[in-house]
Amino acid sequence: MIGTTLTVWAAFQNFGPFNIVIALGIATIKAALVVLYFMHARYSPHRTQLVIVCAIFWLAIMLGLTLADYNTRPHNMQPGEGRLVQPVPSHFLSV
Amino acid sequence: MHRTGDLYGQFQTLEQQKETAALGMWIFLVTEVLFFGGLFLTYTINRMAYSTAFGIGSNTLDITLGAGNTVVLILSSLTMAMAVWSAQVGKKKLVSIFLIATLGLGTVFLGVKAVEYKQKFDHHLIPGRSFDMKYHPTHPMPGDDPKELALEKKEVEEAFAHDPDINAHGQLYFSLYFGMTGLHALHMIIGAGLLVWLIKGSFAGRFRPQYNTPVEIVGLYWHFVDIVWIFLFPLLYLIDRHR
């Protein structure tokens, strides 16, 4: 219940100037408090905790690998603007 | 199915039945995490590609309403947790009170969301033929702050100079905004339906310390919906805020 006061306080902290990392950091802390205390994850059987860890793990795979792929492939198809000088193989996604 | 009171035949004890139900709900929530995760991923990739359009799109959202809604939803999570606690300690009257409070706060959230959607309709920010990010700065609505409007106008003009396709890319932002908040709102509406069912059950005095699985399971769902909003709020409302 103390955590709730903190989360509401954190929500109001967002009004000042800040960057995306702080915003998402606060969001993650809030979400963790909700999972641990409101959803009783802290007092759940180990197999339930395993399911929660799995959710985070698969989410990390999906976000991490997809973003790693998008950020390392050359997407810029516009001639003269990007780093690409050679024709792009057709299997490259265009964004 | 054979059933003794609240205990279904395949379980030995109510405790075992409850743990099984909670595990099943968590597995459902994992699929929900990945479902919303895909949308967050789509949002991130598009935001990296069209950060100017996403930035001014985000700045058109009303931060007061958004932050207010965040508080409302966290409070509703608190009342939901209190309802689960009341059921566990056997305070039957409190269960009803906290469930009704949760439903009330959920309805307030959806009402505020409806006000925000209406604002976007009025400002021509619905993806489609009449979408125009220049519309609102040049067509002030009653009650607009002229200083804010001038800032918005300047910002939109700078953005057009920087990215001439801003109306196309802005539609991407608003498609994701309406898609993500709309799906979140749909989850809230389903949650409100479940709460109505729980409130009926609590009036009938169904939930006792020995058996409160439905309250606990709907509680898990409600908290999950809260968590989705906790991430939607900074990503949609706060990304490029520097006024």
Image: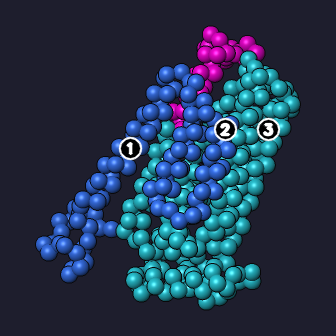
Chain colours: A blue, B cyan
Q: Position of residue B240 (x, y in %)?
A: 49, 68
Indicate which disc residue A2 carries: 2
**Badge 2 amino acid:** Ile
**Magenta stretch in the rendered image:** B1-29
Question: Going by the image, does B179 lie left or right of A83?
Answer: right
- Please tell me which residue is depicted at 54% across the width and 76% down the height of the picture: B128
Pinpoint the chain carrying mark 3. B
Element class at badge 2 = helix
**Element carrying mark 1:** helix
Q: How many numbered dots are placed on residues in this image? A: 3
Instruction: Say whether residue B148 is magenta.
Output: no
The mark closer to the camera, 3 or 2, is: 2
Residue B25 shown in magenta: yes
Residue B53 lies, with reference to residue A8, above or below; the image says below
Q: Which residue matches tag 3? A: B98
Dot 3 amino acid type: Phe
Q: Quadrant of residue B14?
A: top right
Please name whichever residue, B27 or B87, is drawn nearer the observer in this view of the structure.
B87
Chain holding disc 2:
A
Residue at screen point 30% across, 59% down: A70
